[in-house]
């Protein structure tokens, strides 16, 4: 096991994918010489050359559009979109072309393109640098949408995404890039949990807390605080589930947990309104109705644009807001 | 100006003031500025550099989340900014602090944006200066559309004619939006000037990653004139922009101006340019400093006394102290302001979320926390 930051774990995963398959390419703005603004691709151009790690012109539609062409030619491009808020110029290519090619070609064409997007807030950035647009892609059939939450998953899930024959939107929790974790970099993918499965990351008995990406750490901290008890939290046992695959959802793991606990809270940074939590809540209600002791509650961003960063601590769900929802579901 | 005119297709850099501070003439750009005008431009240059330096320090001290420095680009911004008429509309990027200064935006507003207190917030029409656009190149289409509006309002060709200027960088020229703006503006003969500050670097990527021809030559392919100006020469930037704006106001359509300059600092305060470019490049450009040449010219021609330079220096210190203090004491916005201005009128869902969050915040006070 090696201790790596989430960012370094992604780097190691990308390196491994490039070593294992000469058709894997990396492309994006500043990914080469600079190694990406978050250094996720640091050193890869030096080791794999400019043909495989491509500093592209500053044009997101161009990045994804040419990645589609490269994939048609048999390559496996891994695109980096520098920040969540800059994916929108590429949305046309993603939604109208990338997502639908297999369907349109009656299965004759696969587009194994991975699009890495640093997502979420909490870093004191200016606007368009803190967004959570996952539901736009989860709503687009033909795309797989995944989110890693820690270094170990970052290492395996990026490799699984690259080896997938479907296009994958890969969300990276930017405020957790520097969080460290234990990673088995020698290990192959055979033993790894498939990237379309959710994972129980902390067992509990009273409430299921579903979260993903940057919110998994918040969820774990909330569960630990609740377990310790204190004046506001009465020793509740929260089961934390990292959803991991946002599309398709792993309802088997999710419903198994909710059936055990009888209560469910979904937390994400994206707005609650028409967010992924709505889809999860509906499905949990449909599939676990007779096991539920309370309505499924959602915690997340407001139905507003992402606010100026001095207000982001109000916008982002924190431990207190998560536990407030937990208390409400327990008091129901 | 037409695409066929001499300046439109040559590689020649239009320059009126050499790096050594010598005044040179250009047949297409006669310029006769008074000593007072020159001194005013010098003052602008010094003050915006000071604001920039102050902002970088404030970021280092944790008062700003981030800052995008204009260091090295002062002449491009002040020259073009002072060429604007009062009715002309500006569409800036996030680095146009010098143009903002020319349009009367308080630098404290800019600090507020980078501190995370607002997303800009000023009233664009009041200053004829739109909000900073962060998504690269988007504003070039807004500028073109605004210019089409000017046409439809009949505000082209008369005494009170208006024009629009769109600012963007070398990296932006790769974006689809910018290329679409280059299609639209000549097709509709829109009164818009595209002012590209080619500072040679799009974060870590040098110009050759964006273009294999000089950027100003792109315009010709789209059917409108392009010129390249010494972006570190405030007089040339002033004269070239003034002429392009006048052509737009007269109904002659768009012009692309490539201001050839250099980003002396990092892309933003989070960037580390030592990872991708040589310090020797910086040394070359230091010799082309936009401020030093104006100072040398003013001194050599006796258009400014030492007292003037001392007064500007003193004013720069004052401005620095004022914005530093204003930044440090700037209050955070009220939490519930998150819910303001999403729609013309708050929706039921927003009202509900606002009430719930207000009650949630109150619960902490009740708990005495």
Image: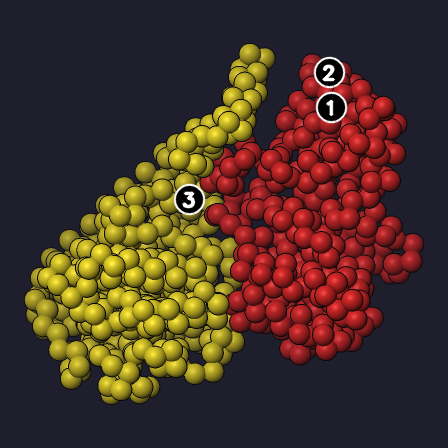
> Of residues A2 and B239, which is closer to you in this image?
B239
Q: Nearer the viewer, mark 3 or mark 1?
A: 1
Q: Nearer the viewer, mark 2 or mark 1?
A: 1
Q: Which residue is mark 1?
A: A295
Residue at 30%, 61% in the rendered image: B148
Q: Secondary structure at mark 1?
A: loop
Q: Is residue B268 visible?
A: no
Cα distance between the residues tagged 2 and 3: 39 Å
Residue at 24%, 62% in the rendered image: B151
The picture places residue A307, in percent across and down from the top left corner, at 49, 39
The disc at residue A250 is: none
Q: Which residue is mark 3?
A: B119
B97 relative to A201 in the view: left or right: left
Mark 2, other Cα within 10 Å: few <14 / some 14–19 / many ≥20? few
Give the quadrant of the N terminus of chain B: bottom left
Q: Secondary structure at mark 2?
A: loop
Q: Is residue A123 visible?
A: yes
Q: Colour of chain A?
A: red
When asked about the image quadrant of residue A141, the answer is bottom right
């Amino acid at each position: 096991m090696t201790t790596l930051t989430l960012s370094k774990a992604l780097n190691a995963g990308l390196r491994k994918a490039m070593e294992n398959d000469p058709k894997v390419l990396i492309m994006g703005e500043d990914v080469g010489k600079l190694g990406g603004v978050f250094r996720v691709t640091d050193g890869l151009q030096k080791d794999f050359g400019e043909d495989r790690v491509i500093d592209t012109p500053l044009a997101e539609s161009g990045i994804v559009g040419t990645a589609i062409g490269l994939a048609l030619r048999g390559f496996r491009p891994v695109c980096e979109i520098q920040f969540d808020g800059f994916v929108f110029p590429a949305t046309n290519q993603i939604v109208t072309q990338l997502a639908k090619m297999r369907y349109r070609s009656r299965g004759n064409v696969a587009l194994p393109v991975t699009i890495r997007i640093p997502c979420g807030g909490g870093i004191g950035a200016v606007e368009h640098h803190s967004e959570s647009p996952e539901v736009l892609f989860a709503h687009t059939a033909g795309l797989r949408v995944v989110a890693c939450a820690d270094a170990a998953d970052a290492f395996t899930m990026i490799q699984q995404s690259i080896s997938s024959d479907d296009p994958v939107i890969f969300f990276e929790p930017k405020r957790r890039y520097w969080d460290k974790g234990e990673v088995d970099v020698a290990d192959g993918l055979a033993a790894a949990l498939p990237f379309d499965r959710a994972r129980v990351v902390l067992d509990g008995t009273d409430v299921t807390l579903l979260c993903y990406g940057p919110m998994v750490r918040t969820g774990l901290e909330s569960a630990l605080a609740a377990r310790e008890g204190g004046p506001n939290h009465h020793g509740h046992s929260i089961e934390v589930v990292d959803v991991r695959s946002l599309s398709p959802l792993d309802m088997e793991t999710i419903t198994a947990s909710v059936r055990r606990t009888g209560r469910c809270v979904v937390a994400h940074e994206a707005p609650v309104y028409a967010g992924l939590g709505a889809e999860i809540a509906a499905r949990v209600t449909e599939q676990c109705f007779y096991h539920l002791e309370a309505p499924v509650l959602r915690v997340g961003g407001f139905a507003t644009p992402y606010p100026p960063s001095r207000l982001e601590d109000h916008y982002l769900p924190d431990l207190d807001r998560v536990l407030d929802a937990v208390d409400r579901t327990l008091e129901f | 100006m037409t695409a066929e005119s001499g300046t439109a297709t040559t590689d020649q850099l239009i320059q009126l003031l050499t790096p050594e501070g010598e005044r040179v003439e250009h047949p297409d750009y006669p310029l006769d500025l008074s000593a007072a005008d020159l001194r005013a431009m010098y003052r602008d240059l010094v003050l915006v550099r000071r604001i920039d330096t102050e902002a970088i320090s404030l970021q280092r001290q944790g008062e700003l989340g981030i800052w995008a420095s204009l260091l090295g680009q002062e002449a491009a911004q002040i020259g073009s900014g002072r060429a604007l008429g009062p009715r002309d509309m500006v569409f800036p990027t996030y680095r146009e602090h010098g143009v903002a200064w020319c349009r009367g935006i308080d630098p404290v507003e800019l600090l507020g944006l980078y501190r995370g207190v607002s997303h800009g917030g000023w009233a664009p029409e009041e200053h004829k200066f739109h909000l900073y656009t962060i998504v690269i190149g988007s504003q070039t289409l807004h500028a073109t559309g605004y210019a089409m509006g000017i046409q439809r309002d009949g505000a082209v060709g008369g005494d009170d004619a208006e024009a629009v200027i769109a600012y963007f960088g070398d990296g932006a020229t790769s974006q689809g939006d910018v290329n679409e703006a280059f299609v639209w503006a000549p097709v509709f003969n829109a009164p818009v000037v595209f002012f590209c500050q080619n500072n040679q670097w799009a974060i870590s990527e040098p110009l050759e990653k964006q273009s294999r021809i000089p950027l100003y030559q792109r315009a010709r392919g789209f059917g409108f004139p392009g010129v390249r100006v010494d972006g570190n020469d405030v007089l040339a930037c002033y004269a070239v922009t003034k002429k392009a704006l006048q052509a737009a106001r007269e109904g002659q359509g768009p012009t692309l101006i490539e201001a050839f300059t250099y980003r002396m600092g990092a892309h933003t305060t989070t960037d580390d340019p030592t990872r991708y470019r040589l310090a020797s490049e910086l040394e070359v450009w230091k010799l082309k400093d936009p401020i030093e040449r104006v100072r040398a010219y003013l001194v050599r021609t006796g258009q400014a006394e030492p007292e003037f330079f001392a007064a500007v220096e003193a004013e720069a210190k004052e401005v620095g102290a004022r914005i530093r203090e204003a930044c440090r004491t700037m209050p955070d916005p009220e939490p519930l302001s998150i819910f303001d201005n999403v729609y013309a009128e708050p929706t039921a869902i927003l009202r509900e979320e606002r009430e719930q969050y207000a009650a949630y915040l109150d619960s902490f006070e009740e708990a005495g926390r």
